[in-house]
Amino acid sequence: MSDIAISVKGLSKKYHIGEKHKRFNRFGDQMVDIVMSPFRRAGRLLSGQAAGASELDQEFWALRDVSFNIKHGEIIGIIGHNGAGKSTLLKILSRITEPTAGYADVYGKVGSLLEVGTGFHPELTGRENVYLNGSILGMRRLEIEKKFDEIVDFAEIEKFIDTPVKHYSSGMYVRLAFSVAAHMEPEILLIDEVLAVGDVAFQKKSLGKMENVSQQGRTVIFVSHNMNALQRLCPQSILLDHGQLVTQDKTDKVIEQYLSVASSKATGPGSWIDLSGQKREGTGKIRFESIKYAGNNPSLSYHPYANGPFEVSVNLISKAACSVGSMAVIIFDRYGTKLVNADTLSHGEPINLQEGRNTITLRMDQLHLNPGMYTIGLWVADPPIEIYDYISSATLFEVVETEKEDIRVQSDGVVPVKFQVVDAVEKS
Amino acid sequence: MKINNNQLSTTSKAGFMIRIEPSSGWTSLKLKDIWEYRELLGIFVWRDLKVRYRQTVIGALWAIIQPLLTMVVFNVFFGRLGKIPSDGIPYPIFSYAALVPWTFFASSINLASNSLVNNSDMIKKIYFPRLTMPFASVLACLVDFVLAFIILLGMMFYYGFIPTLNILWFPFFVLLAMVTALGVSLWLSAMNVQFRDVRYMIPFITQIWLFATPVAYPSSLLTEPWRTLYGLNPMVGVVEGFRWALLNTDTSPGPMIFVSFFVALMILVSGIYYFRRMEKMFADVI
């Protein structure tokens, strides 16, 4: 077993999730609750229950019976939806939290990069923070001293190294933070989505650094939603779903399976997604009941893709027959920037609704979005009089990859664009 | 989580192996871990010191001003107006000799109890022995203690106190103060992770504890069986020890010291155990 770096057997982690947010209809209820809660708590403590036990009675397995082996020098990607247990797995492997059952044998020094800049102190200078952050990440003082110039060089902040980091721009801050982390040299490296920092140029540089790291024969576990990065960096991947290990295979195959698992879920394309639990605003005279979205390509399991068509259908419940001036499908990126607002208001023609359920489908001929995760928001209103219903986050959807060449170009920016080089004249 | 330092002869890459598994019941103290991470401990102390007086006008002078001004206030109200006895030595130095270790103790538990909660992002994202955090806070306060102590030396010179052989015991009383501060801090910092009430309790605790400690008055006000019992508050031993070792007060503390020492040790050991037991859920509930 000498070539095994990580051996995981039956690893499980149980969390208790708090009761659902109490809905306080009136300010008075809230006040009563605030006043009464210490007494209830005290009562519970006195009656011998664990603190807050009755509030935290729902169990949730973030990981359930996960087993796998990773050999020395292997670079493994971990793929899965939000909440599939990826981060929990990394947290256990980096000893931040304990498993509930099972065990993991880890052969070698582990470095984890779950978030860059952890422990950075705004009052300290860049130089001081390099030492502080490096030590927190488990580097020895001598090691930091040796790599100091390299770290500063990589972060491109030589001039500001003796300035307190509170005066840094967020870009500089993140570059320095990543740079420290990227210069760790543990035998086993755990990485969680840290590549999503900085501007595009720096993201590229980071990805390049990660590639270097992976060629030095170190064992790397890499968690990301970025399928491109996973394909480039990791020959092998593990697919997690609802805390369970689905498969461990070549990355291409795992991604394929991940997408097909996704489409079989109620939240995937082509099936109705219930909206009753979503946060919403508006008078409720007309309400969105459910949503469905789809691309047109069966070989992609109807996932939308860049420059492909995109259809969104909604079921609307109206309390009375009426006509509305504005119904919109809005697309946000993961930072909440509004990218698309397909509003019927721009057509100038109202939509007529019957009393009861109405189904309306909006079709966009071309979805000018690069692969990635996006959010759909829904809006129905009669401007400027009344907002009937507004759901800012109805569902998440993924724009998937189609052609495998062009990956590098495609992954930059938000909007894909077709272009030619028209003229290339050399100037003297 | 247990650590097995297995030397694997088969591969040079895997110098050691860690088994990550659920810990059950009372875990081992793993004090070796702290030694492993002594560099990080040093860095935390250094950070605390660096950050503490940034953007203050008088900086580290605060470490001196706090006990000094308290001494002035005590002198006016308890010494002059209250005419509280001071074991036959001038009241200012009598109270200041107690305020130096007391300020160290109070600021230690104040800083250390919040150390985990204030660094929650680190606890959620990175592994390191959590004990290093409150420990570093106590050590950082020790630096303030040294500054305040220098003033005490100046006062001893001014009032013409010549140290006797008693001073050989002085390091022991400093250690006793540290043990007490660390023990109490471990309890409070671990509790604070789960119950933020601790944050509000601390000013209250230190206030009550101050009055329960002979800082403004001598413990010789009590007669003997009670005076020894008074040592159950370990800070009583510290404060009276300081006065005896430095100022050579004629009322030597005697058996009270042993009671204090024993209690302080109990608090520390139980504190480490409690901390260890709670440690595994820090990242989940903080």
Image (tube, coloured by chain):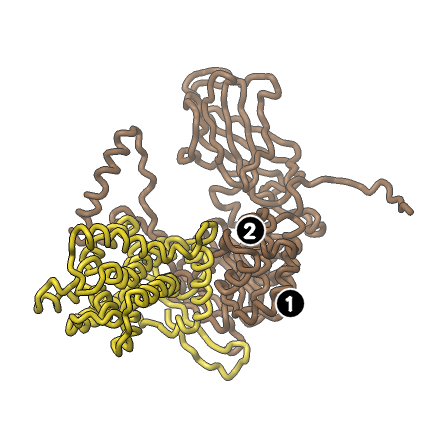
Chain colours: A brown, B yellow
Which residue is rendered at x = 64% and y = 67% of the image? Answer: A215
Q: Nearer the viewer, mark 2 or mark 1?
A: 1
Give the camera-side residue of A218 and B32.
B32
Q: Which mark is residue A215?
A: 1
Q: State the image coordinates of residue A26 (x, y, percent, origin top left).
A: 29, 28
Q: Which mark is residue A304?
A: none
Check disc 2 and report its element: helix, strand or loop: loop
Q: Which residue is mark 2?
A: A225
Question: Does residue A82 appear in this view?
Answer: yes
Crowding around mark 2 (Cα neighbors within 10 Å: few <14, some 14 to 19, many 20+) is some
The percent coordinates of residue B115 (x first, y second) are 37, 57
Compute the Cα span from label 2 to label 1: 22 Å
Q: Chain of mark 1?
A: A
Q: Is residue A396 left or right of residue B191?
A: right
- Is A313 left, or right, of A202 in this rendering? left
Same-chain status of marks 2 and 1 = yes
**Is A198 displayed left or right of B263 in the figure?**
right
Q: Quadrant of residue B135?
A: bottom left
Position above or below: A313 against A131: above
Q: Which of the two residues, A147 or A356, is positioned nearer the viewer here?
A: A147
Q: Residue at x 29, y 29 (%)?
A: A27
Residue type highlighted by circle 1: Gln
* Residue type, label 2: His
Q: Residues within 10 Å of mark 1 (few under 14, many from 20)?
A: some
> Front-most of A35 and A323?
A35
Q: Residue at x 31, y 44 (%)?
A: A19
**Which badge, 2 or 1, is on the more N-terminal residue?**
1
